[in-house]
Image (cartoon, helix red, strand yellow):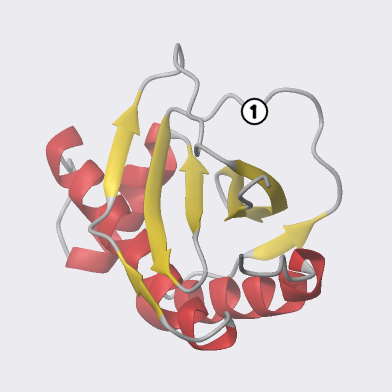
Amino acid sequence: MIQAFPIACYRSQIAGITASIYDTMLHLRVRPVDGVAGEYAGEFTAAIYYAGAWQGALLLECSAEQAIDWTSRLMSLDPPVSLDDARDGLGELTNVIAGNLKPVLPPGIGISMPSVVQGSDYRLRVCGGNLFERLEFADHTGRFRVTLVEVVEEG
């Protein structure tokens, strides 16, 4: 069985990688904000799964407005950006964050293709995932979340 790693120690790497990607790829300053106030009402959740010697997932949750704005910036698209394009753009952005985080995670892992869920009436569960580090960020349109989940096998 793989030993659980101290997931909280990756907080600064998640924050730095996320801020750097938004600055470099989207020309957008984001900043971590303290605390998570109650339930999060994001409309999009993108996920990338890690598999191999270490297992987990990276989740990016945001509003539709953010997904549209970020996709417009990422793909150099003029508004209005379609929701299909917004889902694709959010998946790609999540893929870049997960890929840049991969070298600081335990070795011997691969990443999945992104999946994106739209709506607010759902629950996403990473089976076996019970350790996580969640950071809230803010841009000019509001808050969004980045969560790293570790799958810990019982036994």
Please name the residue shown 40% across and 34% down the image: 44
For badge 1, the amino acid type reads: Tyr
Residue 80, x across and y down, in percent: 17, 40
Which residue is at the front of the view, 52 or 13? Answer: 52
Residue 81, x across and y down, in percent: 17, 43
Residue ranking furthest to the right: 34
Which residue is at the front of the view, 113 or 5? Answer: 5
Within the image, what quadrant is residue 9 found in? bottom right
Residue ranking furthest to the top: 121
Please name the residue shown 69% across and 65% down the image: 31
Q: Secondary structure at mark 1?
A: loop
Within the image, what quadrant is residue 82 found in? top left
Judge whether residue 26 can be spotted in this image. Answer: no
Specify few, some or many for label 1: CA neighbours under 10 Å numbering under 14, 14-19, or 20 or more: some
| 103 w.r.t. 9: above or below | below
The residue singled out by tag 1 in the image is 40
